[in-house]
Image (tube, rainbow, N blue to C red):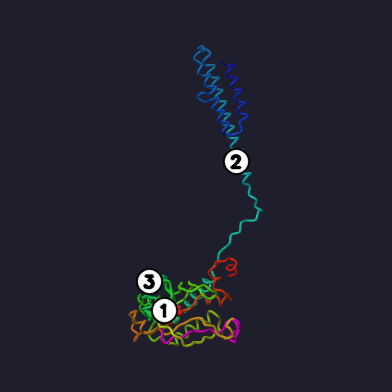
Amino acid sequence: MKQQLEEIRARAAAALQSAGSLQELDAARVRFLGKKGELTAILKGMGKLTAEERPLIGQLANEIRADIEAHIQQNVELIKERMQEEKLKAETIDVTMPSQKHELGHKHPLSIVLDEVKDIFYGMGFSVASGPEIEWDYYNFEALNIPKEHPARDTQDTFYITENMLLRTQTSPCQIRVMEQQKPPIRVIAPGRVYRSDAVDATHSPIFHQIEGLVVDKGITMADLKGNLESFAKSLYGEDTRIRLRPHHFPFTEPSCEIDVSCFNCGGKGCPMCKGEGWIEILGGGMVHPKVLKNCGVDPDVYSGFAFGIGLERLVMFRFNIDDMRLLYENDVRFLNQF
Ligand code: DAH
């Protein structure tokens, strides 16, 4: 039996020697030490031994078991170490390799100019208001003195959700919402997205942006409108900029005007940018119509105000010399990267 045990020791040593993986080591453990393993089989036969032999063989068997276990343990460590080394080798980082480029985003040209406009008006004591893009017919038209069947509705055809609910065609409904919520003095701008059922071309888009302005207080006159908007134009285009008011008609202002700035490209001499005019139209405005004030519970005998609406896309296109509005919405990075 002693002989058999020594043979097991030798076989186990050989098997462990050649085991190259954790699985093979485990198989060897089962083969020699498992319930049906070779060593266990020998121990089962110990009953046949004499009383003198039994402790000697028992001791030897234990020794061999401990031996094999230690050997297995040692090999497990070695194999694990080797696997770790191989893994590290496979993962070696080449610090000289070019890194992946992370493109940093930046503001869209519409946001660049809008933020500038906001800053200018903040500096003049205005705050920013907003209103919903899905608007009631009442706010978008009725309260602004554009009743049903009014011809002004023709130029502002939009997308209707119900007969009384629509995508706003202008930011002017913000005037009504502000006056309903705030008592004068009021000094706000309301930038936002507006919608019209227009076909897309170089100067039209069914979605675009406006910046509304509203000032209401005691004793506000057309001179305030002119002074405020002249300051705005000078801040945006430079100290030499002049403005010009042309009579116009808007249902919610009386009198109404369109405002041009002297061409920031040629200074007013006439060039391709201003189409030889020397002037560029940038906004519409006027004195808030007494009916509009009344609709919002503001007494026109006590208060007066001026309002204006700026088309943001126009400002942006002039600022960056962009000749096609579609570029602003297509999100082509070759275009956007230039800003
Ligand atoms: N809402 C007008 C439009 O979309 C622009 C406008 C003109 C706004 C005059 C005003 C204003 O507040 O006073 O054409």
Q: CA distance from mark 1 to mark 2?
A: 76 Å
Query: Label 1: which residue?
Result: 153
Distance Cα–Cα, label 2 vs label 3: 67 Å
- The picture quadrant where one finds residue 308 is bottom left
The image quarter containing residue 320 is bottom right
Q: Which residue is mark 3?
A: 165
Q: Helix, strand or loop at disc 2?
A: helix
> If the image is split into quadrants, where does the N terminus sit?
top right
- Magenta stretch, residue numbers: 252-272
Circle 2 is placed at which residue position? 84
271 within the magenta span = yes
Quick one: label 2 or label 3, which is nearer the N terminus? 2
Q: Amino acid at mark 2?
A: Gln
* SS type, badge 3: strand
Coordinates of residue 322 in the picture (x, y in percent): 58, 75
The residue drawn where x is 61% and y is 44% is: 88
Q: Is mark 2 within 8 Å of ligand 1?
A: no
Give the mark nearer the N terminus: 1 vs 2.
2
Does the stretch in magenta take in 63? no
Indicate the amino acid at tag 3.
Met
Ligand 1 neighbours mark 1 (CB distance < 8 Å): no
Mark nearer the N terminus (3 vs 1): 1
Does residue 127 appear anywhere in the picture? no
Residue 3, can we see it?
yes
- Under tag 1, what secondary structure? helix
Q: From what the image shows, is residue 83 above or below residue 70?
A: below
Q: Are the residues tagged 2 and 3 within 8 Å (C-beta)?
A: no
Foreground label between 2 and 3: 3
Q: Of residues 294 and 11, which is closer to you in this image?
A: 294
Q: Position of residue 296 (x, y in %)?
A: 34, 79
Answer with the quadrant where ligand 1 appears in the image: bottom left
